Image (cartoon, rainbow, N blue to C red):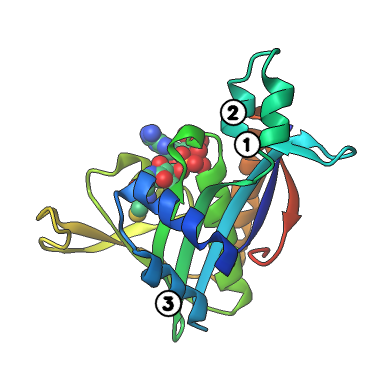
């Protein structure tokens, strides 16, 4: 079982956030960019931190090692690598009644295990709790994984920004209204139920949630 914590980014996790950003986007935000997010009262930046171990003994290891371990090296690796691993991060900016989702990323080794959906659920749940009315974001039209994920939460295409990315690619503007409606609450509930079973299937267990809860 791999224990997961969902919580706001802390200063101690800045280097890990930059590393994850580099892995997922090739360096979208710099360290000072993440520092600015920490300082901004309008920025909600949540991270998913993972640790494998026996909760009773308090022994923990990095999942990437533990999941590929062999019986001989397990104990040594567990002793040597007690540091938790940042496996996901997501951020939105609160702008008047809008939640502008600025980043969403899951470590490439742990994609397709429900973590992206969990992060998006947490961001939107947080926005709902803060009484925001709608959510929006930009995404590459070629990013099928992200598009499919956002569609599950009811995002629809609202427009296009020409040559938005440094590569010259356009951005699709996605939009999700009605965050305060019962219909959206039901969408969130359904998404969370799906997330719960996907996480359980992959052996993840949420051991701590700070912020991000609906
Ligand atoms: C987009 C991203 C965050 C998804 O995270 P993830 O943890 O892999 O997603 P999940 O396992 O929670 O999947 C949730 C849904 O997303 C969609 N999805 C995720 N990966 C997909 C893929 N490779 N192909 C198609 N759909 C995919 C599916 O609809 C999936 O639901 P399903 O499992 O019921 O089919 C992840 O791929 C990522 O970090 N990509 C690089 C960074 C990025 O592009 N971020 C988005 C910027 S807008």
Determine which residue is flagged by label 3. Answer: 36
> Which sits earlier in the primary sequence, circle 1 or circle 3?
3
- Few, some or many residues within 10 Å of mark 2 (<14, 14–19, 20+): some
Closer to the chain start, of discs 3 and 2, is 3
| Contact between labelled residues 2 and 3, with CB atoms less than 8 Å apart | no
- Circle 1/circle 2 CB separation < 8 Å: yes
195 on left or right of 133: right
Residue found 32% across the figure and 50% down from its top: 25
Marks 1 and 2, how far apart at CA? 6 Å
Using residue 105 as the reference point, say whether residue 86 is left or right of it: right
Q: Residue 183: x, y in percent?
A: 57, 62
Q: Is residue 136 left or right of residue 5?
A: left
- Note whether 62 is above or below 48 in the view shown: above
From the image, tell me which residue sits under label 1: 62
Estimate the x, y position of residue 187 in percent, counting from the top left: 57, 54
* Horizontal and vertical percent position of residue 171: 21, 58
What's the mark number on residue 40?
A: none
- What crowding class fits label 1: few (fewer than 14 Cα within 10 Å), some (14-19), or many (20 or more)? many
Q: Residue furthest bottom?
A: 96
Q: Which residue is mark 2?
A: 65
Q: Secondary structure at mark 2?
A: helix
Secondary element type, mark 3: helix
Query: What whole-number distance in Å separates the C-alpha atoms at marks 1 and 3?
Result: 28 Å
Q: Looking at the rendering, in which quadrant would you find the N terminus?
A: top right
């Amino acid at each position: 079982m791999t224990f997961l914590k969902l919580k706001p980014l802390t200063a101690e996790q800045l280097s890990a956030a930059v590393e994850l950003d580099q892995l997922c986007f090739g360096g979208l935000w710099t360290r000072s960019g993440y520092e600015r997010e920490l300082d901004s009262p309008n920025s909600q930046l949540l991270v998913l931190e993972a640790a494998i171990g026996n909760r009773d003994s308090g022994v923990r290891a990095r999942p990437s090692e533990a999941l590929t371990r062999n019986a001989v090296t397990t104990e040594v690796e567990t002793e040597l690598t007690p540091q938790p691993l940042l496996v996901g991060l997501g951020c939105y900016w609160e702008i008047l009644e809008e939640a502008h989702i600025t980043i969403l990323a899951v470590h490439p080794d742990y994609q397709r295990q429900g973590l992206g959906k969990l992060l998006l659920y947490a961001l939107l749940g947080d926005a709902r709790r803060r009484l925001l009315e709608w959510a929006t974001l930009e995404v590459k039209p070629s990013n099928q994984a992200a598009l499919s994920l956002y569609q599950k939460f009811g995002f629809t295409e609202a427009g296009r920004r020409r040559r938005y990315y440094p590569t010259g690619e356009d951005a699709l503007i996605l939009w999700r209204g009605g965050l305060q409606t019962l219909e959206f609450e039901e969408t969130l509930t359904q998404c969370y139920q799906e997330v719960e079973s996907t996480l359980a299937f992959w052996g993840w267990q949420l051991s701590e949630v700070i912020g991000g809860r609906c």
